[in-house]
Image: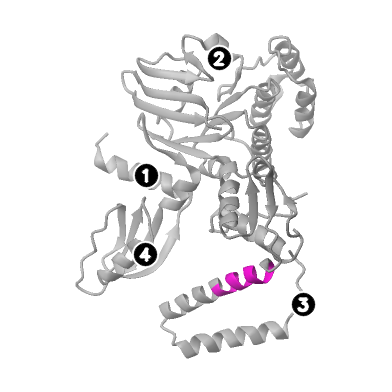
Amino acid sequence: MHSDFVISLSDGRPMYLQIMEQVKQRVAVGEWAPAEEIPSIRQLAMTLRVSVITVKRAYLELEREGVILTQQGKGSIVAPNPELGPRLYDEEFQGHIDQAARLGALLGLTGDEISRRAREAAQLLSLARPTKETV
Amino acid sequence: MNELSVLFEGVGKKYRHFSLEEIHLELPTGSIMGFIGANGAGKSTTIRILMGLVHQDAGKVRVLGHSMPADQAAAKLDIGFVSEDLRLYGAATLAWHMDFMRPIYPRWDQRYAESLLRRFDLKPKQMIRGLSHGQRVKAALLLALARRPRLLVLDEPTTGLDPVARQEVLEELMAVLADEERTILFSSHNTLDVEQISDRITFIDRGRIIDSDDKEVFLDRWRRLRLLLPPEVDLPKLPGIVQVGGSGRLPVLTTNTFEPAMLSACAQMGATVQAVDTMTLEEIFVANVHSRREGQPA
C-alpha cells in the first residue's frame, strides 16, 4: 500500500530526511489529504524495512514542522491545514537555492553569475518539460 | 516500551587470551539492537553469556526478567536463538525439525511456519545436509521465528547470505517488530544491515563496549569536516574531534559531537569549511574503533 515510498541507501542523505521528504510530497500533491489518517510508525517502518526509530524521528520532525499530528495511542494524521502544500514546496525550493548559492560561492562565482546560471537552468527546463508524473 | 528485555551490568569474563570487561547493555522491549564488532571482538561471547551458555565471572545479567545463568531454563522458552553453528541435524529434513519443535514450544505457530516456508522458498522434505548455507540459515530462522519468542537473539544472521536471501531475512525481522512486545538482538559485522533496521546500535571492540546509543543519535553526532586553512595558520584546536586526517592546508576532521557552532568556531580561527559530510555507520564504526585504540595499546 505504501511501498511507493522509495528509500535509497546510496542517497547520502539520512533515511529520516528521505522519509520526511516523501511524506511532504504526498501531502503537497494532495495524495494524503488534510486530516487523513496516515500509516503508524511501526507500519511504515515495516513496509520500508527501516528501523522504528528512524520513522519515529521523521514523524517527530514532521510534527514539529506542522505537517502531521500524532496523538498518543491514536496514530498520526495529516495536519488539517490546507495551506500546507505550497508552503512545503516553497521551503524546499528555498533550501535548494541556499545550497546553490553556497556552492557557487565555493566555486568563486559572483552573485550575477549565480543568478545567470539559475536563469539558464529555468530556461532549459521550460524547453524540455515532459510533464513529470514520477511521484 | 520502557521495559528492558536485556540488561547487562558490569559483566566480565576472563579467558587466557581474551577477556570481556565491564559489559553494560540495555535493550528496551520492542526494539532491535544491532551489535557490531570486528571478528574476535567479543560479540559471540557476550551473546553466549546472554543465553546462559557461558557463565560470567562478574556482573549481573537479566533476560526477560530472568536472572542468567540461574534461570536459563525458564528464559529459554521465550528466546529464539540462531547462531552461526546452527545446530540442525544433517540427516533429518526441515519438516522433521518442525515436528520435533512443535510439542516443545507452546506458542509454536504452524501456519506462520508454513508461510515462512513459502516466503523463504524452502523445501520441507529436503535433508538439511543437502541445503546451501543460505537455506540452512533460513531454515534455522524459520524454526526460531515460528516459536514466536519474545526475544530473538541472532548471531550473525546475515553473514554469507546472498542479497536476495538477506533482504528476505531482514524483511521477516522487521515483520516480527510489528508486535511491540517482541525484541531482537542481532550481531553482525555487516554495518549496512544493522544501519537499515536497528533502533539501537552497540559497538564492541577488544572485549569492551566502546559506544552504545540510538542509531539516529550516532548518525547525527558524527560528521566529517573538510577545511581549507590559509597559509601558515595552524589547525584550530576544537573539542570533540576524534580524528584528524587530510593534508597540511586541507585537514579533514572527524567529530563525534557535532553541532553547528563548530562551523563558526572554525571560521573564527581563519579556516574555511569546505564541506560537512554525514557518515555511514560503517565509517562511524571504523573511526570509533581507531580513535579508541589509539588511546590504549592492545
Name the residue tied to disc 2.
B75
- Residue B140, position in %: x, y? 65, 23
Residue at the image position 47 percent from the left and 9 percent from the top? B70
- Tell me how far mark 4 sits from mark 2, CA to CA: 50 Å
Mark sitting on residue B226: 4
Q: Is residue B17 left or right of residue A77?
A: left
Find numbered disc 4 in the image and state the secondary structure of the residue it sits on. strand
Amino acid type for the residue under numbered disc 2: Ala
Q: Are marks 2 and 3 in contact (CB under 8 Å)?
A: no
Alpha-carbon neighbours of circle 1 within 10 Å: few (<14), some, or many (≥20)? many
Q: Quadrant of residue B296?
A: top left
Given this view, does label 2 or label 1 mark the residue nearer the observer? 2
Of B142 and A33, nearer the camera is A33
Q: Is residue B162 left or right of residue A98?
A: right
Q: Is B107 contained in the magenta span?
A: no
Alpha-carbon neighbours of circle 2 within 10 Å: few (<14), some, or many (≥20)? many
Q: Are tags 2 and 3 found on a single chain?
A: no
- Residue B119, position in %: x, y? 76, 34
Is the residue B121 above or below the residue A126 in the image? above
Name the residue tied to disc 3.
A130
Find numbered disc 1 in the image and state the secondary structure of the residue it sits on. helix
